[in-house]
Image: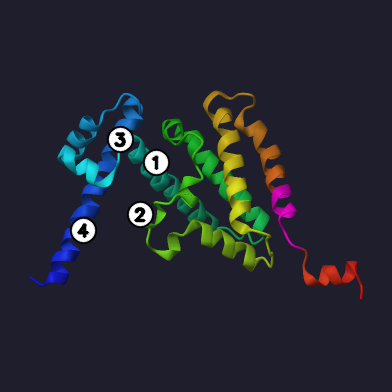
Amino acid sequence: MSLLHQVGKRRGNQITKNNRLLDAAYQLFLEQGFDAVSVQEIVNCAGVAKGTFYLYFRDKDDLRRCLITQKSNELFQRALSALYQTDITTFEDQIIFVVDYVTDILAQNQKALKLIEKDLSLGVFGQKIGEFFADQHTNVLQILIQGAERSGIKLKNPKVLLYMVIELAGSTCFSCIMSSEPFELAVYKPYLFDAIRQLVRSQTLPSKSSLDRTYPV
């Protein structure tokens, strides 16, 4: 067996164990809640030694953060896949579609939302993204930025805008979904979408042609 093959096999085993721990933790957290689950229960469910857990994660909180990053990113990927099946072309409408899709899925799975809480942006901006999703096609941030470019929109700072949109949607929809307070989600959504449109417009740079019309030489 070549050295390269041995390294590849070892890397494959590491990824498998890491995924087993994440899958086990996700199952247990949904069933029992984060606080009620111990590291020992996670490793027992994953079928790995307890020492293996600490090869990948500092503690249970670190695992939770990695798990939220993974699951939130997968959720945004699903939203983008659904978007590709539509004929929506304007950037504003694309962002609204993604936010609408994600919040609807979370509303249908409140246990997952309780785990994610208000950390939805980790799925796009989390530092661990590259460890789970190396494929460029799964780079949610880049795909959304490219959507703006295809719409002919130039943004002041695309990353800042998308961060604000996701944080706004994630934090304000949490209570609407979990307790219908201060509003039910269906009542709140139109106001959220209007705020997102205003955010996008406030961060959109005027085109050169509009500048020429406004400030003739």
Label 4 or label 3, whichever comes before in sequence order: 4
Q: Position of residue 111 (x, y in %)?
A: 42, 31
Q: Position of residue 46 (x, y in %)?
A: 20, 39
Q: Which mark is residue 132?
A: 2
The residue wearing badge 3 is 27
- In 3D space, how far apart are the residues under numbered discs 2 and 4 (Cα atoms)? 13 Å
In the image, 6: left or right of 91? left
Amino acid type at circle 3 is Gln
Amino acid type at circle 4 is Gly
Amino acid type at circle 1 is Arg
Q: Residue at x 49, y 57 (%)?
A: 140
Q: Position of residue 165 (x, y in %)?
A: 61, 46
Is residue 199 shown in magenta?
Answer: yes
Q: Which mark is residue 12?
A: 4
- In 3D space, how far apart are the residues under numbered discs 4 and 3 (Cα atoms)? 22 Å
Label 2 or label 4, whichever comes before in sequence order: 4
